[in-house]
Image (spheres, rainbow, N blue to C red):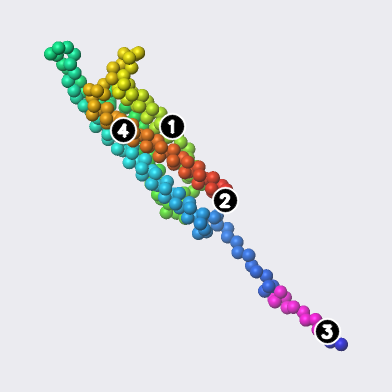
């Protein structure tokens, strides 16, 4: 009696299996949507560093060109010539030096970030971590220098009767306008550094979550 059972050839059984495709590359390198997001973050990082450079440079120029000379009456018919400039105040000298450091830092990190942008996946995790630490350090320095310069500027604007410090902005109007504008630009620099810190932390958290 003949059997109706037929044996399945080994190669036929093997053909029923669907091979699984695996990729050893990390998510940001395989062309997925996450990689595009990291690229956008890297581009935003470069733009923020360009903004940091612009505000630092303009702030330095405005402060350095704040010199103003006026004749101050000291007695009836007697007046003396006095010049107000940023170098008269240690706080303003430190302020200009801090903005110079911020401008130089923005050039270096902007170039590094721009070169990293050309690579697949954008800025590496290690470089992002270094950016967080350096950006946070510079943020503290710029914010402290801005606060010190703002305190001196406020005394120049309002004076301090308890310490017998007279206000000068009613006399040196152009000088006060210059340092007020420079302090405002420095505040923008501080906010830019804060955004850079937040951006780096956000990108790092996304990369850690994808692992």
Q: Are marks 3 and 1 in contact (CB under 8 Å)?
A: no
Q: Nearer the viewer, residue 97 or 195?
A: 195
Asked if residue 12 is among those painted magenta in the image, a careful observer would answer yes
Q: Nearer the viewer, residue 37 or 112?
A: 37
Residue 115 locus on image (x, y percent): 41, 50
Residue 194 locus on image (x, y percent): 44, 38
- Depth check, mark 4 against mark 3: the one in front is 4
Which of marks 1 and 3 precedes in the sequence? 3
Residue 195 locus on image (x, y percent): 44, 41
Query: On screen, 25 above or below 7?
Result: above
Q: Residues within 10 Å of mark 1 (few under 14, many from 20)?
A: some
Residue under pointer 2: 210
Residue under pointer 1: 140
- On-image quarter of the N terminus: bottom right
Q: Residues within 10 Å of mark 2 (few under 14, many from 20)?
A: few
Which of marks 2 and 1 precedes in the sequence? 1
């Amino acid at each position: 009696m003949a059997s109706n059972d037929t044996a399945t050839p080994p190669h036929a059984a093997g053909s029923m299996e669907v091979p699984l495709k695996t990729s050893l590359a990390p998510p940001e390198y395989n062309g997925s949507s996450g990689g595009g997001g990291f690229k956008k973050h890297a581009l935003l990082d470069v733009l923020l560093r360009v903004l940091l450079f612009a505000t630092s440079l303009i702030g330095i120029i405005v402060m350095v060109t704040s010199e103003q000379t006026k004749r101050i009456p000291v007695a009836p018919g007697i007046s003396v010539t006095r010049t107000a400039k940023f170098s008269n105040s240690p706080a303003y000298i430190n302020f200009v030096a801090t903005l110079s450091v911020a401008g130089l830092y923005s050039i270096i990190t902007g170039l590094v970030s721009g070169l990293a942008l050309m690579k697949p996946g954008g800025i590496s995790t290690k470089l992002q971590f270094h950016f967080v630490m350096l950006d946070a350090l510079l943020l503290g320095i710029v914010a402290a220098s801005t606060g010190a310069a703002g305190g001196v500027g406020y005394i120049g604007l309002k004076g301090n009767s308890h310490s017998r410090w007279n206000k000068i902005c009613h006399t040196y109007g152009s000088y006060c306008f210059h340092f007020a504008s420079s302090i405002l630009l420095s505040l923008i620099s501080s906010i830019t550094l804060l955004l850079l810190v937040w951006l780096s932390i956000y990108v790092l958290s996304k990369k850690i979550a994808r692992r």
